[in-house]
Image (cartoon, rainbow, N blue to C red):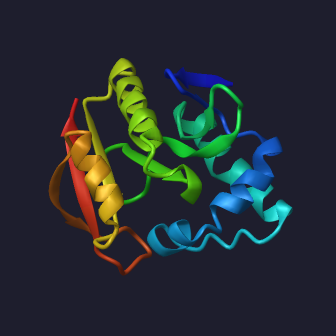
């Protein structure tokens, strides 16, 4: 199901047919370093991630991580969306893109449109979290006018993360 369309991108629900892409993205060096190893090693793992992650959140919250694909050729290039996560009072924005599609403005385009969606849905505030050494994500969050509010440790984790905030 298509959720957002921009000049170059379509953001849509992640489908079971996207399992090969999910397996590839979740095993990218950047994902493993900055987001963490989700243990996605097989197509079944990827299908379980899709069903118990994004699709479960669509059902529960009406939003989640959306698959980002280029409009002109329908090639999937990343994920971007809104997440309601344990340990954060507010909804947060998350994004990850395949290495070969980074630094081309796609993440900013997708994240900007996602912020507009949050505003349309009546959300008053969005947060974002990132590791202290993920300078690319920090730079993008600041480009979205998000401000560093402080640091947070999520439940069942030990790493202190940077927490950004934006009042919509």
- Quarter of the image with the C terminus is top left
Indicate whether 153 appears above or below 168. Answer: below
The percent coordinates of residue 107 (x first, y second) are 44, 43
The percent coordinates of residue 86 (x first, y second) are 42, 57
- 153 or 33, nearer to the observer: 33
The percent coordinates of residue 123 (x first, y second) are 32, 28
- 100 or 95, nearer to the observer: 100
Q: Would residue 88 be visible to someone looking at this image?
A: no
Residue 45 lies left or right of residue 60; in this view the side is right
**Residue farthest to the bottom?**
158
Indicate whether 93 appears above or below 36. Answer: above
Residue 108 lies left or right of residue 142; in this view the side is right
The percent coordinates of residue 23 (x first, y second) are 73, 61
Location of residue 59 (image quadrant): top right
Indicate whether 52 appears above or below 5. Answer: below
Q: Residue at x 77, y 45 (%)?
A: 18
Location of residue 40 (image quadrant): bottom right
Residue 75 lies left or right of residue 130; in this view the side is right
Q: Residue at x 84, y 61 (%)?
A: 43
Q: Residue at x 52, y 72 (%)?
A: 36
Q: Would residue 116 be visible to someone looking at this image?
A: yes
């Amino acid at each position: 199901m298509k959720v957002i369309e921009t000049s170059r991108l379509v953001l849509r629900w992640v489908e079971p047919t996207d399992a090969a892409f999910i397996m590839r993205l979740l095993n990218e060096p950047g994902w493993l370093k900055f987001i963490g190893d989700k243990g996605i090693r097989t197509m079944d793992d990827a299908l379980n991630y899709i069903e118990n992650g994004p699709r479960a959140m669509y059902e529960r919250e009406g939003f989640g991580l959306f698959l980002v694909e280029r409009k002109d050729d329908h090639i999937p290039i990343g994920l971007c969306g809104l997440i309601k996560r344990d340990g954060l009072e507010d909804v947060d924005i998350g994004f990850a893109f395949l290495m070969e599609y980074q630094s081309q403005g796609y993440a900013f385009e997708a994240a900007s449109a996602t912020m507009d969606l949050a505003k349309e849905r009546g959300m008053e505030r969005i947060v974002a979290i990132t590791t202290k050494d993920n300078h690319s994500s920090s730079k993008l969050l600041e480009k979205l006018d998000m401000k560093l509010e402080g640091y947070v440790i999520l439940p069942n984790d030990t790493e202190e993360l940077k927490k950004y905030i934006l009042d919509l």
